[in-house]
Image (tube, helix red, strand yellow):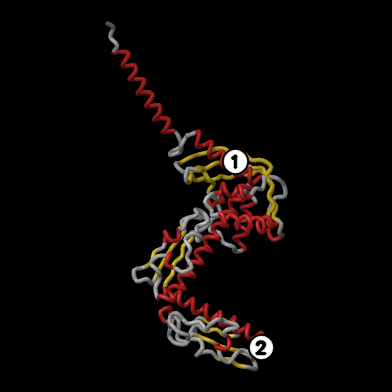
Amino acid sequence: MKNNSFGWSRIVLCLVVISLLISLFLYLSPPGYSQNNQEEALVKETVEKYLQAVKEDKAITAIKYIAPDTPEMMVIDILAEYRDDFKEDLEMDMKSFSVSAIQIRGNTAQATVTEERKILFKHDDFKDLFDKDYKKTTDTFFLEKRNGVWSIEPSQTAGISDFDDSREKIKSIMETVNKMGTGRLFALFVAISQYNRCEENMGDIKWELMSYVGEHDKYPSRLSELEGYDQQHILCPYCGKDVYSETYKVSADGTKYEFSCPHHKPLGSLECKGEREADLLIQCESNLKNLGTALEMYSTDNQGHYPEKLSQLVPDYLKWIPSCSCAGKDTYSISYTSATNPDAYTVYCSGNNHSKSGIPPNYPQYNSTQGLIIGK
């Protein structure tokens, strides 16, 4: 019988060598990036279908690849904004595109997109910043796998940080747009639309919280306690979920709150904070502004004259005279004065109601010449 020890030794040696080669391959591969051809194909297919939709101006199809979780009503709003505003300013024409250099790390991926395209800005303000002919562009697209499906991440793909609407910032954005492909530009539009709608949601919630604290003297323990809060409709346009309730926190004494949305970066962080005294002051200022509007409407209907008493505004110009939430009563009627030759008025929050906000007694005020006056 022959001795097979040499044969087994060779097998073991081969296995050791194979193991070393696999380790070396993994070591030399980009750290953390998947080499799964099937996933790469899915990423490429997603980007190509999105770009084809942009090329053919099929906006609602493109939105599905870049904002799959956006609630349907918001998609309709975004589409209307695209047709009415975006296309009024910009004209895009994509001649060709290609997708390459796909890298995958877990549930995130990136791909390089090359386009030959032309972008024309229709308004004179920034028209000269744009090239008149077709040009080649190269952009990096970022993707995220959510619920087992790859989609383009609009804010990262857009690559614009600290978005605001100042003229200098817009000029800077326009210069960047001239270097973008149309796919990235459409991503920028969607990212800004989602950001603006999320900001509107948070503004609506903040106003409801101000009304609540004015009535209850503290903030609710949960957003669902707000009378006007509808968890089915107040959803983040990026993820389609009520992230506001998930992030809402209130202090133990109910005098402070905060909530946020973790999405929309790098356009900017969306955070909302409030304190009882500050919100009650904002409410009082709003009351005075509403009184001022009603007084001007009365004046228009009465040959430029203002009423002798605020009660004359009810019910034609106001349903009722508002109350200052800090004082818990109408502090405006007692302070109101009017004059003729010339016609004028002054009204203020009478009493020392906002001292915790650093406001002196009998302020804020509102008059016919200066409008709102917060303090001396």
Q: Are marks 1 and 2 in contact (CB under 8 Å)?
A: no
**Which mark lies nearer to you, 1 or 2?**
2
**Amino acid under label 1?**
Glu
* Disc 2 residue type (three-letter): Asn
Label 1: element kind: helix
Instruction: Report the quarter where the N terminus lies.
Output: top left
Which residue: 63% across, 82% down?
Answer: 297
Residue marked by disc 2: 302
Residue beneath disc 1: 48
Question: Is residue 222 among the parts visible in the rendering?
Answer: yes
Residue 192 visible in the current orientation: no
Query: 225 and 19: which one is in front?
Result: 225
Callout 1 crowding tier (Cα within 10 Å): few <14, some 14–19, many ≥20: some
- In the image, what residue occupies the spot 52% across and 80% down? 287
Percent x, y for residue 4?
A: 29, 11
Residue name at image x 46 percent, y 65 percent? 272
Quadrant in the rendering for residue 244: bottom left
- Pick the front one: 217 or 364: 217
Q: How crowded is mark 2: few (under 14 residues within 10 Å), some or many (20 or more)?
A: few
Q: Which mark sits nearer the N-terminus, 1 or 2?
A: 1
Q: Residue 138 at what x, y percent from top left?
A: 60, 43
Vertical position of residue 118 compared to residue 193: above or below? above
| Residue 220 placement (x, y as % from top left) | 40, 69
Secondary structure under tag 2 reads loop
